Image: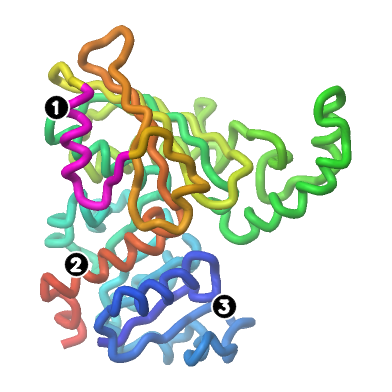
Amino acid sequence: MRVAVVGATGAVGTIMLKLLERRSFPATEIVPFASARSAGKPLGTLVVQPLREDTVGGFDLALFSAGGATSREWAPRFAEAGALVVDNSSAWRMDDDVPLVVSEVNPDALDRIGKGIVANPNCTTMAVMLPAKALHDAFGLRAMVCTSFQAAGGAGQKGMDELAAQVDPVRGHDLVNDGARAAGAVQASVHAKTLAFNVVPWLGQDAGGGYSDEEMKLLNESRKILAIPGLEVAPTCVRVPVMVGHSIEVRATFERPVSVDEAMEAMRAFPNLELDDVPTPLEWAGRDEVCVGRVRADLFDERSLNFFVVGDNLLKGAALNTVQIAELLHQRGLVGARVA
């Protein structure tokens, strides 16, 4: 089984390679791909290959984390050459012929791979989907209000680098009495505004109506993954000065009255979902599981529940789910069929 990893030198691609090794994925050969400027560079015992017509053939699986433009151009080429593609960008998520999969939530969607491509959800949506599915099965989910607190690492390595570079210049100013001067000590290019010692209530591109595309992903992807076309989602996405780990406060509303004890029992039984009284992104960075805490009955509605979700956006939010999908494709006997 030959596996291509496209975008192998990026933050997520690097983790994909490590996970394939750590989880003993049964590949006979793993080939890293990246931009032309990285071609020929060693990655451990592997050598980075360029994306060209003569290099993309003969693969059983291609795991992509190279951005939407690269995925739109090259994912179909790998698929046409016989590979099953698992793509981590937003390029294919809402395509009706492409399943959008969270491995623990809707694995049966893999039975309908029309274009030979499987999409990985947005990292914020991903974290919410595990508790949402557990609670939907128990109480019938109808609506969510989701406010995210997203790490700098959601913008990749450059997002983390910009935050780290801002800390000392901003800290050198009066953060109490002259915050505007402190914020102006640096020029933000990755994040919408200065992120160090700050929170920025905007990330992504303008999607109209005052919402960003990051917020609309929470609505549209949740509906597709959970197969609830009418699910109501009120999203607000905020960037916070955390390196890795997205957090989301969720107010979920159901068809039936919900009790905290029954909700905790449903989530405790769900795979790769952990419970913690006060989960924080720092403590859960580097862990495979999604964690839920602050589970509270709503103050006004017996059919609503409030809870706080934390997940490593580079692991379960991206690289890990990609590898888990690859494992499911192998377990279901789907890998290799296209090459044959």
User: Where is mark 3, residue-wise?
Assistant: 35
16 sits to left or right of 275: right
| SS at mark 2 in the image | helix
Q: What residue type is labelled 1?
A: Phe
User: Where is mark 1, residue-wise?
Assistant: 139
N-term mark: 1 or 3: 3
Query: Residue 315's image quarter?
Result: bottom left
Instruction: Point out the stretch of residues depicted in magenta.
Output: 260-275
Q: Nearer the viewer, mark 3 or mark 2?
A: 2
| SS at mark 3 in the image | loop
Query: Do the residues under discs 1 and 2 have CB atoms within 8 angstroms?
Result: no
115 drawn magenta: no
Q: Position of residue 119 (x, y in %)?
A: 32, 58
263 drawn magenta: yes
The answer to which of 39 and 11 lies nearer the viewer is 11
Q: Is residue 285 above or below residue 219?
A: below
35 sits to left or right of 106: right
Q: Which of marks 1 and 3 is in front?
A: 1
Q: In this view, does 308 lie above or below 324?
A: above
